[in-house]
């Protein structure tokens, strides 16, 4: 079984709809991240969380919110989706006990906003 | 601020040829550097990492990278390309605060027979 899972894997929605993307991990890591990938732009950090009570904005947090329901679960919400939020979204985890912040990625969620 | 620049958004090689993917970094502190690979329709997988222990770092699938402080570079190489190496490759550096990874824009590697 995969260590980092994301649901759904694909989602098509309409402008203005509320969308939630979910991430679960079985690695026992305390740190979790949400990234967005656009062609030619690499990955950009949306939010990150170092534990259940520690949530921080990344470089492109506008239009997004997150919830850390438990150490193993980290959800990303688009309150009112817009077409330029069409992208591939990745969840990642890392262990605070490791000095190098090596991150482990989920398989991604492809979101299309019409 | 930390940043990485990947030179060349697309690299094409023949099977059996040398693979060279370029990455230059900017860092105000000793950097921790990573190369990740993304195969089609998959997430990112760690290829190798530089953590200051050795300047030549060996990774999975025959890849290696050399940290050159004087050139602020961390280029990825493989002596002989295989068709299965076709993927997108990302160079990344840990942010100054150590809170997250900062990624380059990626290089797509194509391998022809």
Image: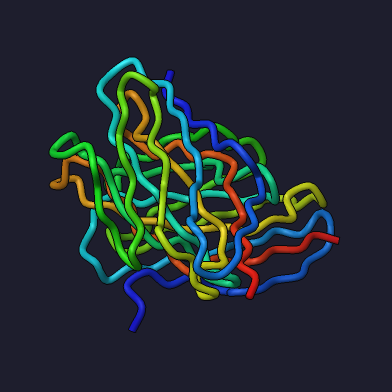
Picture quarter with the C terminus of chain B: bottom right
Q: Position of residue A33 (x, y in %)?
A: 42, 49
**Frontmost residue, A15 versus A2:** A2
**Frontmost residue, B71 versus A25:** B71
State left or right for residue B109 relative to residue A69: right
Figure colour scheme: rainbow
Q: Position of residue B57 (x, y in %)?
A: 24, 47
Picture quarter with the N terminus of chain B: top left
State left or right for residue A79 relative to residue B25: right
Q: Residue at x 25, y 23 (%)?
A: B30
Q: Quadrant of residue A24?
A: bottom left
Q: Residue at x 59, y 36 (%)?
A: B7
Q: Is residue A85 above or below residue B101?
A: below
Q: Residue at x 27, y 71 (%)?
A: A26
Looking at the image, the residue that sits furthest to the top is B28
Q: Residue at x 48, y 31 (%)?
A: B4
Q: Position of residue B11 (x, y in %)?
A: 63, 52
Q: Position of residue A19 (x, y in %)?
A: 66, 61
Q: Is residue B94 above or below residue B9?
A: above
**Frontmost residue, B61 versus B98:** B61
Looking at the image, the residue that sits furthest to the front is B17
State left or right for residue A114 relative to residue A67: right
Q: Is residue A92 above or below residue A100?
A: below
């Amino acid at each position: 079984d995969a260590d980092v899972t994301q649901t759904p894997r694909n989602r098509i929605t309409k402008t203005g709809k509320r969308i939630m993307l979910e991430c679960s991990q079985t690695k026992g890591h305390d740190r979790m991240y949400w990234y967005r990938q656009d062609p030619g732009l690499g990955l950009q950090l949306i939010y990150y969380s170092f534990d259940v009570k520690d949530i921080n904005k990344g470089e492109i947090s506008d239009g997004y919110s997150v919830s850390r329901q438990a150490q193993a679960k980290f959800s990303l919400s688009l309150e009112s989706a817009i077409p330029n939020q069409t992208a591939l979204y990745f969840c990642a985890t890392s262990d605070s006990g490791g000095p190098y912040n090596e991150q482990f990625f989920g398989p991604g969620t492809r979101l299309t906003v019409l | 601020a930390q940043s990485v620049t990947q030179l060349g958004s697309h690299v094409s090689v023949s099977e059996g040829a040398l693979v060279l993917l370029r990455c230059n970094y900017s860092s105000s502190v000793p950097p921790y550097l990573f190369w990740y690979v993304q195969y089609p329709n998959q997430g990112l997988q760690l290829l190798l990492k530089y953590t200051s222990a050795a300047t030549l770092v060996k990774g999975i699938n025959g890849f290696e990278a050399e940290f050159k402080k004087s050139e602020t570079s961390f280029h990825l190489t493989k002596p002989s390309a295989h068709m299965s190496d076709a993927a997108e490759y990302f160079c990344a550096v840990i942010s100054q605060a150590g809170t997250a990874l900062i990624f380059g824009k990626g290089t797509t590697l194509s391998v022809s027979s």
